[in-house]
């Protein structure tokens, strides 16, 4: 990548995601009001297009090898409020309004455990907001 | 992974990060008060240990091939308030108090551009919080 290309990618107004070798980009989902981190997933170009068109978060499931609309079976969709991309365009931020729990465990967020300072144990958050 | 191992990883109180083939795990950094997504980076086991010990976010730089303490040259360190891990322990959430801009461009966050609904263009956020 030349310096000019790099500058355009960082400062320009053209969406030009840097997908990885598998054609994927990391997508971070937060609650649009509380800022809580809800989940992390991956998108390919098709998932990103589907998300922007439908207004509901759609990812690429690496385990299932197909597009996966969050909530397609549970009904717990993630309504997209705003999508952002980072400086070098290799990560997406989806600010969402979640219709239900983000996590398959039923927790509101996948991040329901804190790492203790000892670096070995986890503490469950009583009521992750 | 057996069902029992999977259950322990998701519900247990033992930190057991699932590093990828390169020994890395994705780390998401948000502002501990506003919930703003500041940056994404990667950690290896050494970076995670250094972060927990020092209380300042330390990552593994894939481009430089070495540990990289955020702010080591700029002074813009990220003070760790809380670290969390997700259900299947393949992603970390660092809630931080940033001493300065998170982004190398000088922006407070790396996510300073929103994706327009057309799916092609970007809009700069005037004052990303």
Image (spheres, coloured by chain):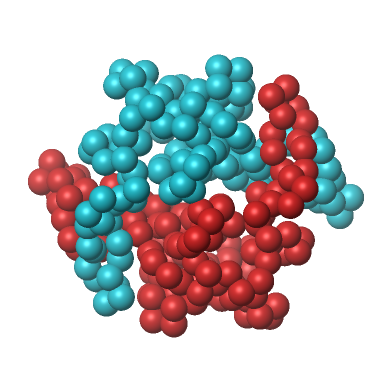
Chain colours: A cyan, B red
> Toward which corner of the image does residue A23 lie, by quadrant?
top right
Spot occupied by residue A50 in the image (x, y as percentages of width and height): 56, 20
Tell me what residue is drawn at x 59 percent, y 57 percent. B38
Task: Judge left or right: residue B129 versus residue B86.
Answer: right
In the displayed structure, B129 sits above or below A119; it is: above
In the depicted view, which residue is nearer to us: B83 or B1? B83
Which residue is at a point 61% across and 18% down the rendered structure image? A53
Q: Closest to the observer: B7 or A64?
A: B7
- Asked whether residue B86 is in view, the answer is no
Q: Foreground residue, A77 or A8?
A: A77
Q: At 55% across and 38% down in the image, what residue appears?
A: A94
Question: Viewed as shown, does residue A32 lie left or right of B108?
Answer: left
Q: How many marks?
A: 0
Q: Is residue B12 left or right of residue B28?
A: left
For the question of whether residue B112 can be seen, the reply is yes
Rendered view: A92 above or below B95: above
Picture coordinates of residue A30, whole percent (x, y): 48, 43
- Give whichever of B67, A91 is nearer the camera: A91
Give residue B32's position: percent from left, percent from top. Answer: 48, 62
The spot of residue A68 in percent (x, y) is: 42, 23
Asked if A50 appears above or below A98 in the picture, the reply is above
Residue visible at 58% across and 27% down in the picture: A48
* Residue sitting at the far right: A4
């Amino acid at each position: 990548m030349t310096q000019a290309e790099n500058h355009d990618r960082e400062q320009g107004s053209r969406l030009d995601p840097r997908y990885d070798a598998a054609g994927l980009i990391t997508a971070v989902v937060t609650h649009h009001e509380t800022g809580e981190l809800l989940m992390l997933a991956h998108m390919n170009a098709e998932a990103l297009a589907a998300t922007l068109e439908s207004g509901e978060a759609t990812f690429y499931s690496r385990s299932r090898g197909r597009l996966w609309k969050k909530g397609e079976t549970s009904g717990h969709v993630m309504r997209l409020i705003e999508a952002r991309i980072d400086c070098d365009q290799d990560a997406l931020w989806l600010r969402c309004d979640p219709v239900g729990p983000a996590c398959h465990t039923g927790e509101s967020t996948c991040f329901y455990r804190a790492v203790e300072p000892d670096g070995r144990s986890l503490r469950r958050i009583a009521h992750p907001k």
